[in-house]
Image (cartoon, helix red, strand yellow):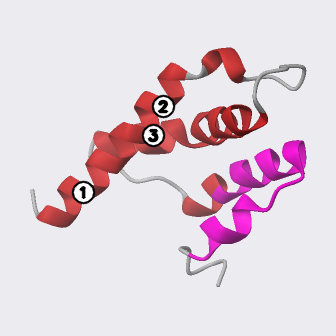
Amino acid sequence: MNNSDSQTKILAQALYEIRLLLPAYLGSQNTGDIAVRKAAHLAYALHNDALAIIEGKTFDAQAAIERVRAVDRMFGDNFAERFGAHSPNEA
């Protein structure tokens, strides 16, 4: 495994672990800290993609960005624009 693959898998593992730590903050009616709720929803939106990377597979970047857009709609944020900057289809 080259250094870039290792780095990618380490970051994917971190995202996957964050998803496992924050399920109590999911849901539109949750009254927890807003930053933690946003983190929980972002991690939930992308955890299957992170798992794909951990397992040496790929994922559909456009579909992942669409899931981030759903988080944006929920919170009135603009995460998808920043994520889209890393996708050739969004540039």
Residue 73: give x, y in percent of width and height.
88, 49
User: Horizontally, is 69 left or right of 52 in the view?
Assistant: right
Residue numbers of the magenta segment: 65-85
Screen quadrant of the C terminus: bottom right
Kind of residue at badge 2: Ile
Query: Badge 3: few (under 14), some or many (20 or more) residues near its Cα, within 10 Å?
Result: many
Q: Which mark is residue 7?
A: 1
Q: Which mark is residue 36?
A: none
Screen quadrant of the N terminus: bottom left
Kind of residue at badge 1: Gln
Q: Residue, x 62% and y 18% (percent of image)?
A: 23
Answer with mark 3 or mark 1, whichever residue precedes in sequence: 1
Residue designated by label 3: 15
User: Image quarter for residue 4?
Assistant: bottom left
Q: Residue, x 56% and y 61% (percent of image)?
A: 61
CB-based contact (under 8 Å), mark 2 and mark 3? yes
Residue 25: give x, y in percent of width and height.
70, 21
Name the dominant secondary structure of the magenta segment.
helix
Residue designated by label 2: 18
Answer with mark 2 or mark 1, whichever residue precedes in sequence: 1
Label 3 to label 1: alpha-carbon separation: 13 Å
